[in-house]
Amino acid sequence: MNLFKKLLARARASNLQFHESFGFQVNDAPVIWTPNRVVNQGLNYILNAAFRGEGVISSWYIAPFAANVTPAAGLTAATFTSTQTEFTNYDEPNRVVWTPDASASAQELINSASPAVFTIGSGVQTTIYGAALLSAQAKSSTSGTLAAAGLLPSGLTGLAEGYEVRIRYRITASSS
């Protein structure tokens, strides 16, 4: 039995792992990082695009959300807007493009140098609870692919017109 447990532990330790997080910054305040999940739709996309060359997506967009709801593994682009209540009270006409700083060379992609900037509008939504990475550009779109979504430990509350919310997305991969 001990040999079986050792083999099982070794098999688990050799898994490919993704670690990802969203970073939120309001105006010039410090960045708040929150872990998130690569949802099943995102995992399937990664496998199919990387190993089968299927449907490679060249542009990804960040979308904040207004519901205090932990993203589930089964969340998809089709259910994101209604389940997470997409936050649309910002002046930019569409979801903001995620532009990684460079190609992955240290098993990491991040948009630290060019965070997605959302300028808060005059609407009724004033709290952001999290963000997602999607392939569709239009606000509230239910098409495309949802790669990842993350919930803040507590919402960014009291967002007033003209505030700037900068969102970063970082994903790293490792294998042992």
Image (cartoon, helix red, strand yellow):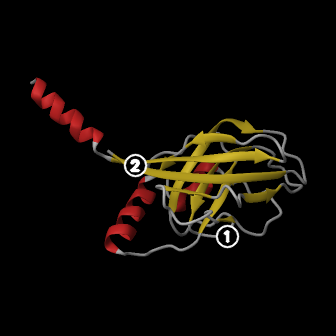
What crowding class fits label 1: few (fewer than 14 Cα within 10 Å), some (14-19), or many (20 or more)? some
Q: Percent position (x, y) of residue 66? A: 70, 47
Q: Residue furthest front?
A: 105
Amino acid type indicated by mark 1: Ala
In the rendered view, does 127 fall on the left or right side of 137?
right
Residue in the foreground of this view, choosing between 55 and 103: 103
Question: Does residue 129 sit above or below 50 in this rendering?
Answer: above
Find the distance from the CA under tag 1 to the CA under tag 2: 32 Å
Identify the residue shown where x is 80% and y is 49%.
125
- Dividing the picture into quadrants, the one containing residue 32 is top right
**Mark identifier at residue 138:** 1
Which secondary structure lies at badge 2? strand
In the rendered view, does 47 fall on the left or right side of 138?
left
Question: Does residue 12 sit above or below 100 in this rendering?
Answer: above
Which secondary structure lies at badge 1? loop
- Dividing the picture into quadrants, the one containing residue 30 is top right
Residue hosting label 2: 174
Q: Quadrant of the C terminus?
A: top left
Give the mark, 1 or 2, whose residue is nearer the N terminus: 1
- Dividing the picture into quadrants, the one containing residue 10 is top left
Residue in the foreground of this view, choosing between 36 and 81: 36
Q: Percent position (x, y) of residue 98? A: 64, 63
Amino acid type indicated by mark 2: Ser
Residue 74 visible in the snapshot: no
